[in-house]
Image (cartoon, rainbow, N blue to C red):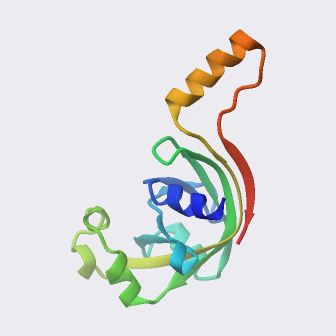
Amino acid sequence: MTDTFWNRLSKIRAVMLDAGTGSPVPMAPIARQEDGAIWFITSSDHDTFQASKNGAASDIYLCDSSGHMYGTVKGTLSASDDTDKLDELWTPMAAAWFKNGREDDSVRLMKYTPREAEVWVTDGTVKYLFETIKANVTDDTPDTGDYGVIHF
């Protein structure tokens, strides 16, 4: 289930990140199983970055049909000064958020280290609809995917 988690997470373009600063905010995750981390590029004045400087306990909420995965990830959000990693992760999507692109003084990198994830992995909408219809006809419970708790 751990490999499935990382594979599916790499297809998700937005998560809700709760860094304990009030309401969760949408962020673009960069999943790197080889780092054991989920990276976020943000601005130095963003509330989540301010929280990350103190190693905030944080939650990520997954609800994305493109990755076919739903659930909650618990872990720690920390600020990273790794400019090589930032260069490696930099994308045109990130550049769109900063007036001066990668050279913008406000560009910051955050590292999310997951501790535990509770996830539901599905095969997509078509399978879900089929299983739901089948369950109504047969009185069986629909098989809509896999559920698991992952400890990192």
Image position of 108 (left or right of 146)? left
Q: Position of residue 37 (x, y in %)?
A: 56, 75
Image position of 125 (left or right of 72)? left
| Residue 148 against residue 123 in the figure, above or below | below
| Residue 22 against residue 130 in the figure, above or below | below
Q: Position of residue 20 (x, y in %)?
A: 67, 64
Location of the C terminus by quadrant is bottom right
Image position of 103 (left or right of 118)? left
**Residue sitting at 45 percent across and 44 percent down?**
66
Q: Position of residue 5 (x, y in %)?
A: 59, 59
The outermost residue toward the top is 137
Q: Position of residue 81 (x, y in %)?
A: 46, 89
| Residue 8 against residue 80 in the figure, above or below | above
Number of labelled discs?
A: 0
Q: Nearer the viewer, residue 140 or 40?
A: 140
**Residue sitting at 73 percent across and 62 percent down?**
150
Is residue 45 visible to us here? yes
Location of the N terminus by quadrant is bottom right
Is residue 106 visible to us here? no
Image position of 6 (left or right of 56)? left
